[in-house]
């Protein structure tokens, strides 16, 4: 069911790692591109990202990837998966780099974990949050199919998403604070963790994405 998967390329992120994982998960064809026509024709779209949000947002806007993403989301039959900084870019604003306006596709803030950051027992936690952590499935979604609640996924981030509409939260993670690990709305699913680095669970989530029809 996957067809052609377009990975939006704005020059920031582990694009080929994501593309390789999608191919391993069973994608028929994966294109890493910012070509508007190819993205428009693709059956599903992935919006990844790694790095500082200021640089990411500058390139997203310079290459008009914001419009490409908006067009993909407007096509309710085209599933869209956002990953890591791709998820953060969807929000209204980020505290990173002294404050950066984001795409405001999903109202909310990207917040700094804080320093010092401690767990419930007062033990010091390192920032960035880097490594495996359990994701609590806040609500059912086709992309959780076959993935047990509290499965561990791989994270690398110093800032976390805090969505205004709590009904959009599909997964959460605890790391000193409760952070939004996954958001879902219509044909969009966004994750803070890296499915392409999350071994069996990550590949299952990508396989679910390839089989998803974009309906919640």
Image (cartoon, rainbow, N blue to C red):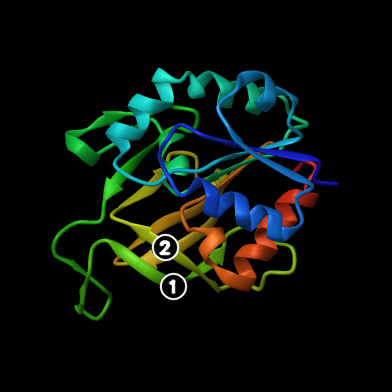
Viewer-closest of 56 and 128: 56
| Circles 2 and 1 in contact, beta carbons < 8 Å | yes
Q: Earlier in the sequence, mark 2 or mark 1?
A: 1
Give the left or right position of residue 147, taking residue 85 as reference.
right
Label ID, residue 168: none
* CA neighbours of label 1 inside 10 A, class few (<14), some (14 to 19), many (20+): some
Residue furthest to the left in view is: 116
Viewer-closest of 50 and 171: 50
Q: x, y percentage for residue 88? A: 41, 41
Residue 25 appears in view: yes
Q: Quadrant of residue 208?
A: bottom right
* CA neighbours of label 2 inside 10 A, class few (<14), some (14 to 19), many (20+): many
Q: x, y percentage for residue 181? A: 48, 56
What residue is at 62 percent from the left and 20 percent from the top?
Answer: 36
What residue is at 66 percent from the left and 73 percent from the top?
Answer: 148
What residue is at 64 percent from the left and 72 percent from the top?
Answer: 200
Q: Quadrant of residue 103?
A: top left
What residue is at 77 percent from the left and 48 percent from the top?
Answer: 212
Q: x, y percentage for residue 192? A: 46, 53
Q: Quadrant of the C terminus?
A: top right
- Is 93 located above or below residue 176 in the figure? above
Residue 149 appears in view: no
Q: Quadrant of residue 98?
A: top left
Q: In the rendered image, which residue does mark 1 sit on?
A: 132
Give the left or right position of residue 68, taking residue 205 as reference.
left
- Is 38 located above or below residue 184 in the figure? above
Q: Secondary structure at mark 1?
A: strand
The Cα atoms of the two marked residues, 2 and 1, are separated by 6 Å
Q: x, y percentage for residue 186? A: 68, 36
Residue furthest to the right in view is: 1
Q: In the rendered image, which residue does mark 2 sit on?
A: 155
């Amino acid at each position: 069911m996957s067809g052609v998967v377009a990975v939006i390329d704005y020059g920031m992120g582990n694009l080929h790692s994501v593309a390789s994982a999608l191919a391993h998960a069973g994608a028929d064809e994966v294109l890493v591109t910012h070509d508007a026509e190819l993205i428009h024709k693709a059956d599903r779209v992935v919006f990844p990202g790694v790095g500082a949000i200021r640089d990411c947002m500058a390139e997203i806007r310079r290459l008009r990837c914001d419009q490409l993403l908006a067009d993909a989301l407007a096509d309710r039959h085209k599933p869209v998966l956002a990953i890591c900084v791709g998820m953060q870019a969807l929000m209204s604003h980020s505290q990173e780099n002294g404050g950066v306006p984001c795409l405001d596709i999903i109202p909310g803030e990207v917040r700094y974990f804080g320093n010092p950051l401690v767990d419930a027992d007062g033990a010091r936690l390192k920032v960035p949050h880097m490594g495996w952590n359990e994701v609590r499935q806040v609500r059912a979604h086709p992309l959780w199919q076959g993935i047990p609640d509290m499965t561990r996924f791989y994270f690398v981030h110093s800032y976390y998403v805090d969505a205004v509409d709590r009904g959009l939260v599909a997964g959460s993670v605890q790391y000193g604070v409760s952070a939004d690990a996954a958001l879902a709305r219509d044909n969009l699913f966004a994750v803070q963790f890296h499915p392409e680095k999350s071994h069996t669970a990550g590949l299952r989530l990508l396989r679910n994405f390839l089989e998803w029809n974009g309906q919640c």
